[in-house]
Image (spheres, rainbow, N blue to C red):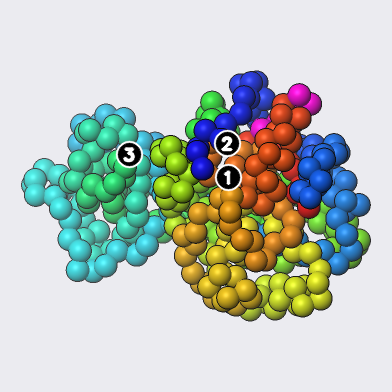
């Protein structure tokens, strides 16, 4: 299958640059068996779903992964986009710095502590292994050292606080919301609240599970009052969600792995819904990927535990778990559009997208929603 089979025309003005008030988005309902669409609002969700349906949401929380600071010792501008939560550094690792001048910036504690993670850095040509960066603000100072080059321009870096402060706290305090590249503006204080779901709980994503951005506490309460059940799982969304498909053949593309966790309670709730022949409606492509990966691992059931989703869902995929999907409108020729097409049919999805363009729906992360049943 060709990647160009998933292309469509989208006027730039339909790419949402700002979020609407939470809970006010439009909703397109696509019937995947008939291919017809209806137009409504996200507030219609309780009356659109059936009593007994199970909504599965992703409770991951976005952290402020974009750091802006200075190179050390030159003082030139530096930018660092963290590609995942930092892990504790291993004691045996030592700094790669050899220069006595630069070594003065690395306290002994940083050689056996700090946090390690992958990142994209700018300017890449000047931030080679051994380079240092400094990020500071009212909350304190965060230091970073480039340890090694990795694939596709990525770097392995070490982060630490020169005052012994908590690294995760400083990242969230000093960092910026990592808005998607198609949002052509700087982040604001509004994004700190609006680029999180109301059920976000577990810190670890560099992008929001955007289908969840439409929910309000009041909408969740109304869904519950209509007999629509909800449970939550956790999948940490990586920067790979924006990774372009660089191949011409769909099947040759490789998606980045993402870690997820399904609790004992969530696994029981999902299995009970399946045994009672109730619909399992995934809120978002991230939730879909975690659920279907878990079903493959457990041969058709869902077991509690942690795992890493590596599967690429595209047309021809045999869905074992979900029977409904709430999602946003996705980029042309993207792996997410291919996932949606696998569930609803490519022709149905492209026809629905054309209808959405004609009806002036808002697209992408801060855009409107589509329910596929």
Q: Position of residue 320 (x, y in %)?
A: 65, 66
The percent position of residue 310, horizontal first and vertical second, equals: 46, 60
Pointer 2: residues within 10 angstroms few (<14), some, or many (20+)?
many
Secondary element at tag 3: strand
Q: Main secondary structure of the magenta part?
A: loop
- Which residue is drawn at the image coordinates 88% and 51% (left, top)? 48
User: Residue 228 vs residue 200: left or right?
Assistant: right
Choose between 273 and 100: the one closer to the eye. 273
Disc 2/disc 1 C-alpha distance (Å): 7 Å
Circle 3 packing at 10 Å, graded few (<14), some (14-19), many (20+), is: many
The residue where tag 1 is placed is: 338
Residue at 54 percent of width and 26 percent of height:
185
User: Can you give x and y, in whole percent of width and height, for residue 288 in the image?
Assistant: 63, 58
- For marks 2 and 3, give the one nearer the viewer: 2
Q: Is residue 121 magenta?
A: no
- For disc 2, the marked residue is 6
Q: Is residue 353 left or right of residue 60?
A: right
Q: Which mark is residue 121?
A: 3
């Amino acid at each position: 299958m060709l990647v160009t089979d998933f292309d469509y025309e989208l006027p730039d003005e339909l790419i949402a640059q700002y979020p609407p008030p939470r809970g006010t988005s439009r909703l397109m309902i696509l019937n995947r068996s008939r291919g017809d669409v209806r137009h409504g609002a996200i507030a219609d969700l309780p009356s659109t779903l059936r009593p007994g349906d199970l909504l599965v949401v992703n409770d991951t929380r976005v952290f402020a992964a974009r750091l802006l600071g200075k190179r050390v010792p030159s003082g030139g501008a530096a930018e660092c986009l963290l590609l995942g939560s930092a892990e504790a550094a291993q004691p045996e690792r030592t700094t790669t710095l050899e220069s006595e001048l630069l070594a003065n910036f690395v306290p002994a504690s940083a050689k056996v502590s700090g946090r390690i993670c992958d990142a994209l850095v700018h300017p890449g040509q000047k931030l080679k292994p051994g380079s240092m960066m400094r990020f500071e603000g009212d909350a304190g100072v965060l230091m970073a050292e480039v340890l090694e080059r990795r694939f596709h321009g990525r770097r392995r870096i070490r982060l630490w606080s020169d005052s012994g402060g908590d690294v995760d706290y400083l990242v969230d305090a000093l960092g910026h919301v990592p808005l998607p590249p198609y949002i052509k503006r700087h982040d604001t204080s509004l994004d700190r609240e609006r680029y999180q779901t109301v059920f976000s709980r577990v810190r670890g994503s560099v992008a929001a599970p955007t289908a969840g951005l439409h929910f309000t506490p009041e909408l969740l309460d109304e869904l519950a009052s209509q007999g629509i059940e909800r449970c939550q799982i956790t999948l940490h969304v990586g920067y790979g969600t924006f990774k372009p498909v660089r191949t011409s053949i769909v099947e040759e593309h490789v998606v980045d792995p993402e870690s997820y966790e399904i609790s004992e309670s969530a696994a029981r709730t999902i299995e009970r819904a399946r045994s009672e022949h109730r619909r399992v409606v995934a809120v978002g492509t991230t939730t879909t990927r975690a659920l279907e990966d878990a079903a493959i691992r457990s041969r058709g059931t869902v077991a509690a535990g942690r795992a890493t989703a590596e599967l690429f869902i595209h047309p021809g995929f045999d869905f074992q778990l979900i029977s409904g999907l709430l999602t946003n409108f996705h980029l042309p020729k993207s792996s997410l559009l291919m996932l949606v097409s696998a569930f609803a049919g490519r022709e149905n999805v492209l026809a629905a997208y054309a209808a959405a363009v004609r009806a002036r729906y808002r697209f992408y992360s801060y855009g409107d929603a589509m329910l596929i049943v």
